[in-house]
Image: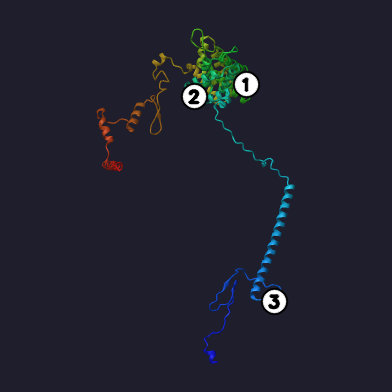
Amino acid sequence: MNEKFDRAPGAEKSRTHPAGPGFMGSWDGDTSPTFFNQREPLRQPRTSPPLAENNIGLDLDSSVGDFKRQSKTQQSANGNNSSASKWCSDDVDSLVRSSKLSANAAEFVPSGVTEYEVPTFSDDSDIYYSELTLADMVTDFLSHLSSSPGSFESDVEYMIETLNSWVTTEDLLQELVELIFTQSTAIPNFSYMGARLCNYLSHHLSINPPSGNFRQLLLKRCRTEYEQRDVAVRGNPETQKRFHSFVLFLGELYLHLEVKSGKGHPNRAQILLTGLRDLLDCLFSNPEDANLICAVKLMKLTGSVLDDAWKESRKPHMEELIRKIEIILLDATCSRDVRQMLLKLVELRSSDWGRVSAAAASNATPENDPNYFMNEPTFYTEDGTPFTAADPEYAEKYQEMLDKQEYFHDVNVESTDDICDFEDEMEPEMEEAYESFCLESESKRQQ
């Protein structure tokens, strides 16, 4: 007992520690654990090894068994993989053989979707100008004149040069006449510019085929439309509108188209004078509002010239037209506005179409000429009341307006420099701020 108690606790006893996974050996004084395998412990074999074999033999047998099992497992996996690969390849081959798809098939486009075509652009100027037609060029030029009528004088010479190089055959000349006639009667308010252009072309277009020059072909085209007047004046509104445009264009053409005579002084086309008289008779013979409005416009446009021409030839055509207007005012069932227009037209003709002779203008006074103050400006008072030079209190009102608006200053012409000096003076604060600004700017420049 004493001997046992004399021993140090735990002396001559061997302690065994549970070996962790992968560790073999004992935990004695100078010994240390050995690490040889980091895998998990192998399961026990189905048959136990003989007890007579030592530890080395046991380790060798277990390693060999482990290697064999791994080989079998790997062979089994390889076999499975090869069989799976073989099955997949067979499946793919069968799908390819049974498929109806083709690499050469057309592109699928869903219904309702339009294919986009990439536009092609070309910078070749020769191709561009070869595609330009006479109709395109004339239409563009007429549209330009319609939007910018003030450019007629500056642009018409260039157009004549271009047309002389283009229009070289009788067919092209006929096409040019048709284009200008159509545009002049189709574009609103273009009849005046179209008539001016026709007059310029009749004198400067160089082509002169046996069938007729530009003016002759234009008059033939107008005659074709003129011969349809009895049908057009009773047609539908669209036909009447086209016919009225032609009537106004013919009036402008009579005013602007000049025909050279042997004496050197240009004259108007007499055939147009006869045509306008027939057109006015046709319009007044069918007293609808649209026809009457067109007739009033034509007489306001050409009435003074027609009246002078008929008086010179001693033909009472204007008196006959005025009598027709008076009959329409008494009997026709036209609208109130059209009736008022006809009354104003008769009044205009009675005043010689608003013309005033030079002798009468020199002797005109506010008492004997109602139009004496026609060109005088109109002013307005503070309350909006208009007044002109015809107002008896014009001088007083005008002076009062000038005084209130301070149009006159109580300064002499000699004190003009003082006014400039007064306007150029600055207040002390402004002058000081300006000087500091100049100094700051100078210092920045020196830096």
Give the CA distance from mark 3 to mark 1.
Answer: 133 Å
In the rendering, at what x and y percent does residue 70 appear?
A: 67, 65
- Residue beneath disc 3: 50
Q: Which residue is mark 1?
A: 232
Residue 366 located left or right of residue 198: left
Residue in the foreground of this view, choosing between 47 and 393: 47
Q: Is residue 428 left or right of residue 236?
A: left
Q: Quadrant of residue 367?
A: top left
> Counting other residues with Cα less than 10 Å from the Cα at mark 3, is it few (<14), some (14-19), or many (20 or more)?
few
The mark nearer the N terminus, 3 or 1, is 3
Query: Where does residue 108 sit, x and y in percent of width and height?
Result: 67, 42
Residue 230 in sight in this render: yes
Q: Nearer the viewer, residue 257 or 229?
A: 257
Viewer-closest of 144 and 107? 107
Secondary structure of the residue carrying tag 2 is helix
Q: Please, what is the three-letter code of the amino acid marked with disc 2?
A: Pro
Element carrying mark 3: loop
Pick whichever of labels 2 and 3 is earlier in the sequence.
Answer: 3
In the image, residue 82 sits, relative to residue 412, either above or below, namely below
Question: Is label 3 or label 1 in front?
Answer: 3
Q: Amino acid at mark 1?
A: Ala
